[in-house]
Image (spheres, helix red, strand yellow):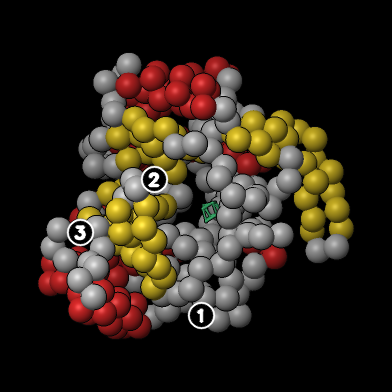
Amino acid sequence: MSTIIYPSPIFGPVHSRRLGISLGINLLPADGKVCSFDCIYCECGFNSERRPTQPMPSRELVAQRLEEKLQQMSAENQLPDVLTFAGNGEPTCHPHFAEIIDDTIRLRNQYCPQAKVSVLSNSTMIHRQQVHDALMRVDNNILKLDTIDPAYINKVDRPTGNYDVQLIIDRMKAFKGHLIIQTMFMRGNIGRRYEGTEAQEYEESADNTGDKYVEPWLDAVRAIKPQQVMVYTIDRETPAHGLQKATHEQLDSIRDRVIALGIPCTASY
Ligand code: SF4
């Protein structure tokens, strides 16, 4: 299995054509994964296979390592275009997420005021007022909404606690447009999955590209009124082995239906 565990608390920078120079901030432990979802497509692997032994980095350590890295990048004249909260799980699970956002904005303003601060989140903590308020302060508040079908969500995103998709939609509306919805589309089936040494067969479909899923999702997008939507598909090896990429045509078609609602949308293949 070639899923990835990222260094913590700082990783990269990664150079990409779309984002430019992106410096990663990983608020999860360096040796495993912590997430309130357990997606069958997660590039970090299944939660059960990636249990960490180390703690999450402290607020102080994140600020210290970020400042050191920005000083180094400044000396090399290679300052980042974006500071991206991502990594081994869900950043908003960190108990000091809001304070870390404030530290990051302060350091961004000091070292690279042109850079954007982006957060990739699975949306499960946006009901917490502190998390909501912190996400209102970042430039790119990128929130996952893979479908609005509870059975699909339980099968594919696999929340580890209570998850009420209608509540998530209501909380997304509360951002009043200050959010980017990110949605994974894929085909195939859940396939063979390993629990320890036990192989279990899951032949259920994981395909969310059909109208059964896309139409209600479009209704939710229309109601949430995000500033942008990003649709994408699997890119790396996934822990569940029966998954397949959505086609370019499928992603383009979904993208065009979002644009027809008057909402900017990008598709990544
Ligand atoms: S929300 Fe992200 S980090 Fe968490 S399991 Fe899903 S893909 Fe992995």
Q: Which residue is mark 3?
A: 115
Q: Which residue position holds label 1?
A: 55
Q: In terms of secondary structure, where does tag 3 sit?
A: loop
Judge from the rendering whether residue 249 lies leftward or rightward of residue 25; answer left or right.
Answer: right
Marks 3 and 1: in contact by CB < 8 Å? Answer: no
Q: Amino acid at mark 1?
A: Pro
Identify the image quadrant of residue 195: bottom right
Quarter occupied by the N terminus: bottom right
Label 1: few (<14), some or many (≥20) within 10 Å?
few
Is residue 44 at all visible to an observer of this figure?
Answer: yes
Rounded to the nearest angstrom, the CA distance separating label 1 from label 3 is 29 Å
Few, some or many residues within 10 Å of mark 2 (<14, 14–19, 20+): many
Q: Which mark is residue 143?
A: 2
Q: Nearer the viewer, residue 5 or 40?
A: 5
Single out the residue that lies furthest toward the front.
76
Q: Position of residue 4 (x, y in %)?
A: 58, 63
